[in-house]
């Protein structure tokens, strides 16, 4: 029976994995095979589960006994239905087959019908499932919060009732009540001797470990999170890190202000007619500023802390850090000016900066690399902690990628397509993702106060990321004029990304295990949680997008824009914020406002959802239109409402960045308010001095 | 393991692996593609103004395979279902008029 089922699924899935039902021997077999593999694993787990559940039953000797035992698990309605079915089966003998066909809807039917439903494509199904995961999380979270709020309101109501009763009892001076009470008290009579101290109302915390004792219940708008328990660290590179993060925050606000304006231009294309502000020039200004300005500077700044910390030593050279900061900042400033003036590197996406500008960025990376390597070389631990594997490799790989991308020999013509695909995807995967994973391997265990779940999984993810991620660049140009085998390799590599992504996600969420309660008490952990969630959904969405059918449908549409924001923002930006909210208070000793941090988090999260989901829906409809061969202008008209939603979501995200900047300022700016205790002591001293005279 | 406790060996190994893969999936195919390409069979040959226009297009870095509507043209001409019946890519190297 199980073998039959397996066979059935194996027959069914390859058809679904491919865009059309043709022979099995095409290149499109690979995504199909991957799906079969996953389905097989799920099947095995399922069968294993059933086997375990029924093992006891099977142990019963006779077949009759087994049947009886199984039937006993069913309720009356099920038994009746089964009897009906069996009588039908005896009559027709074909009921089982018919049932199977109704249970397995589209893939089998798709073969026979001419027009395929969009929802029979596995790439689409996977994407829809992935999109719903964070939404479901948000809905469940909201429901829990509402339930808690209602519970609290109910409690408060009861307390009011209680005080009313108390008042009534106090005021009505009736003897009957006293009598009744004393009789009732006597009835209760005997008490077991209490172990608690009798004078519990006058207890005192002798060790001084209770920070805040609340003697009345309050119904507050937001729950107060626990303090970050800051131990201010005296770091020699503290000022350097703050400058890195400060510059990053500036580029975030700058870059997303530009992005916000671009979003507005989609709704109001005639907003201006200044060449420096034209869409074609501002778009790369936005992407490059948030890539090389915001994310890269934030990452390097955080690494100035993490690399020496996990090496148990100090940063090799603070001066090198400053030089790198200057170089990278000047690259972004000059690059922005060049782009706005119309001086750019043509169609190379994410490498629109001309090479002399990018060389400044590269020099900054080389200096940072030397600095970090020297730091690791003088480490006081034998092993190299996994964070440093990721961080240092990310810098090395990015230098390799940038060299390949800017060297002209192999891209004087059609070769540029292949180099472009390689470069832009390695840029996000090997620079931002690899680096951020390195940071998370330090900050997440530190925040959860537990060691990382599995060091081995981290190492597996590291090597498999190198092997698979390097291959996937050309999946951006499926169906274009590049070798078919290379396109297939890219698709296979995209499916292979399941391994590092699942390994990483599992590792991080299992680190949370047993410490989930900390989530609601911390204002930093939600950022990590969401970042990891999008690491899973965003990365696997990339895999689903790489299939041939989904490429045909989504490529060149707004869907790609949604995907890049889901990953660069949902993963990278959220993780970086989490890290910054952890680290900066440790350097300055000042925490951000909890309310503002909460507002930052929710504006960013909700904004991202409003931004990406309409673009995904609109992008899909647009792709379908193109495939039908409709006029291009029709797809523009179609997108108008979706672009409005994108502008709304983008505005929420932009607002959250302003809030983040305010928070950063609060954490960093020296407190101007005088310390009350200091003044009180000074005044006391003065008064003693005058008294003594 | 010694390999992973020595930063020189660890990072050398990772870098070598990455560069080797990069050469195989990026540099070599790029060089090959530059040398081996031809217009699609039956594609109209560009002349005069049209050719000059295309050269400006390419000179500005509008990568042929991305922005010359090659893919869109293929979709609209042949439709999604018939893509596979076209000649395989390495021989045809679709729309690059060269």
Image (cartoon, grey):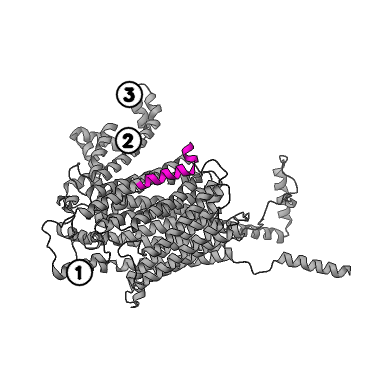
The image quadrant that residue B96 belongs to is bottom left
Residues packed near mark 3 inside 10 Å, few (<14), some (14 to 19) or many (20 plus): few
Q: CA distance from mark 1 to mark 3?
A: 81 Å
Question: Callout 1 environment at 10 Å: few (<14), some (14 to 19), or many (20+)?
Answer: few
The image shows residue A129 at horizontal and vertical percentages of 35, 51
- Do labels 1 and 2 touch, CB within 8 Å? no
Q: Are marks 1 and 3 on the same chain?
A: no
| In the rendered image, the vertical position of residue A274 relative to residue A251, given as above or below | below
Which label was assigned to residue A79? 2
Mark 1 — residue?
Answer: B53
Relative to residue B46, is residue A86 drawn left or right?
right
Query: Regarding mark 3 in the picture, which secondary structure is present there?
Result: helix
Where does the C terminus of chain A fall, quadrant-wise?
Answer: bottom right
Viewer-nearest residue: A81 or A578: A578
Tag 3 near tag 2, CB within 8 Å? no
Q: Which residue is mark 3?
A: A63
Going 40% across and 71% down the picture, which residue do you hit? A337
Measure the alpha-carbon separation of dots 1 and 2.
Answer: 76 Å
The label on residue A543 is none
Which sits in the foreground, A400 or A189? A400
Is residue A251 found left or right of A471 in the rendered image?
Answer: right
Please name the residue shown 42% across and 52% down the image.
A433
- Residue A132 seen in the figure: no
Q: In the picture provided, is A670 more to the left or to the right than A472? A: right
Magenta residue check for A115: no
First of labels 3, 2 by sequence position: 3
**Inter-mark Cα distance, 3 to 2:** 18 Å
Q: Which range is magenta? A: B1-19
Could you say where residue A604 lies in the image, as x and y percent from the top left?
Answer: 45, 62
Secondary structure category for the residue under label 1: helix
Comparing labels 1 and 3, the label whose residue is closer to the camera: 1
């Amino acid at each position: 029976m199980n073998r039959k089922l397996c066979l059935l699924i194996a027959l069914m899935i390859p058809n679904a994995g491919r865009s059309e039902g043709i022979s099995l021997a095409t290149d499109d077999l690979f995504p199909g095979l991957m799906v079969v593999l996953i389905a097989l694993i799920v099947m095995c787990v399922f069968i294993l589960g059933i086997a375990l559940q029924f093992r006891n039953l099977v142990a019963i000797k006779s077949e009759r006994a087994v049947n009886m035992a199984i039937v006993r698990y069913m309720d009356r309605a099920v038994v009746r239905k089964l009897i009906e079915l069996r009588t039908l089966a005896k009559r027709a003998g074909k009921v089982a087959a018919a049932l199977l066909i109704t249970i397995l809807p589209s893939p089998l039917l798709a073969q026979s019908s001419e027009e395929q439903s969009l929802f029979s494509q596995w790439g689409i199904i996977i994407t829809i499932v992935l999109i719903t995961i964070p939404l479901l999380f948000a809905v469940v979270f909201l429901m829990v919060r509402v339930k808690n709020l209602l519970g609290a309101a109910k409690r408060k109501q009861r307390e009011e009732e209680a005080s009313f009763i108390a008042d009534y009892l106090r005021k009505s001076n009736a003897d009957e009540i006293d009598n009744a009470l004393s009789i009732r008290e006597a009835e209760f009579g005997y008490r077991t001797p209490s172990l608690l101290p009798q004078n519990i109302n006058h207890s005192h915390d002798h060790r001084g470990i209770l920070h805040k004792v609340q003697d009345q219940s309050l119904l507050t708008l937001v729950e107060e999170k626990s303090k970050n328990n800051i131990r201010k660290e005296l770091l020699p590179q503290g000022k350097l890190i703050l400058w890195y993060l400060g510059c990053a925050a500036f580029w975030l606000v700058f870059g997303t202000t530009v992005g916000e304006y671009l979003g507005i231009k989609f709704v109001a294309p005639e907003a201006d007619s200044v060449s420096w502000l034209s869409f074609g020039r501002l778009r790369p200004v936005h992407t490059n500023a948030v890539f090389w300005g915001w994310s890269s500077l934030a990452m390097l700044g955080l690494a100035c802390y993490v690399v020496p910390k996990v090496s148990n030593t100090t940063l090799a050279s603070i001066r090198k850090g400053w030089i790198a900061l200057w170089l990278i900042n000047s690259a972004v400033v000059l690059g922005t000016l060049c782009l706005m003036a119309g001086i750019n590197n043509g169609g190379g996406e994410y490498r629109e900066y001309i090479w002399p500008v990018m060389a400044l960025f590269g020099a900054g990376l080389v200096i940072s690399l030397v600095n970090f390597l020297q730091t690791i070389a003088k480490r006081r631990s034998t092993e190299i902690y996994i964070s440093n594997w990721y961080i240092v490799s990310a810098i090395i790989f990015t230098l390799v990628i940038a060299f390949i991308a800017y060297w002209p020999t192999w891209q004087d013509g059609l070769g540029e397509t292949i180099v472009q695909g390689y470069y832009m995807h390695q840029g996000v995967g090997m620079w931002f993702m690899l680096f951020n994973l390195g940071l998370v391997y330090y900050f997440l265990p530190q925040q959860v106060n537990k060691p990382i779940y599995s060091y081995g999984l981290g190492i597996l993810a590291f090597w498999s990321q190198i092997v698979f991620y390097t291959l996937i660049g050309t999946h951006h140009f499926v169906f274009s004029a590049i070798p078919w085998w290379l396109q297939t390799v890219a698709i296979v590599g995209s499916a292979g990304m399941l391994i590092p992504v699942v390994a990483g996600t599992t590792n991080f969420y299992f680190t949370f295990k047993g410490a989930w309660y900390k989530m609601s008490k911390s204002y930093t952990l939600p950022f990590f949680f969401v970042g990891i969630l999008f690491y899973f959904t965003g990365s696997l969405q990339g895999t689903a997008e790489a299939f041939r059918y989904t490429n045909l449908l989504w490529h060149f549409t707004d869907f790609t824009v949604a995907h890049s924001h889901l990953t660069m923002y949902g993963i990278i930006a959220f993780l970086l914020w989490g890290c910054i909210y952890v680290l900066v208070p440790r350097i300055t000793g000042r925490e951000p406002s909890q309310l503002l941090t909460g507002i930052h988090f929710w504006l960013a999260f909700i904004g991202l959802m409003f931004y990406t989901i309409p673009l995904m829906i609109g992008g899909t409809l647009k792709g379908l239109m193109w495939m039908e061969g409709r006029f291009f202008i029709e797809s523009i008209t179609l997108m108008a409402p979706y672009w409005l939603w994108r502008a709304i979501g983008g505005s929420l995200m932009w607002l959250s960045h302003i809030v983040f900047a305010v928070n950063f300022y609060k954490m960093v700016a020296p407190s101007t308010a005088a310390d009350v205790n200091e003044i009180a002591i000074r005044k006391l001293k003065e008064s003693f001095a005058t008294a003594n005279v | 393991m010694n390999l992973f406790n020595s930063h020189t060996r660890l990072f050398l190994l990772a870098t070598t692996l990455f560069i080797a893969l990069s050469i195989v999936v990026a540099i070599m195919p790029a060089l090959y593609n530059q040398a081996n390409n031809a217009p699609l069979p039956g594609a109209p040959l560009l002349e005069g103004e049209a050719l000059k226009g295309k050269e400006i297009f390419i000179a500005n870095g509008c990568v042929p395979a991305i922005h010359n509507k090659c893919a869109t043209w293929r979709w609209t001409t042949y439709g999604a279902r018939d893509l596979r019946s076209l000649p395989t890519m390495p021989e045809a190297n679709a729309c690059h008029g060269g």
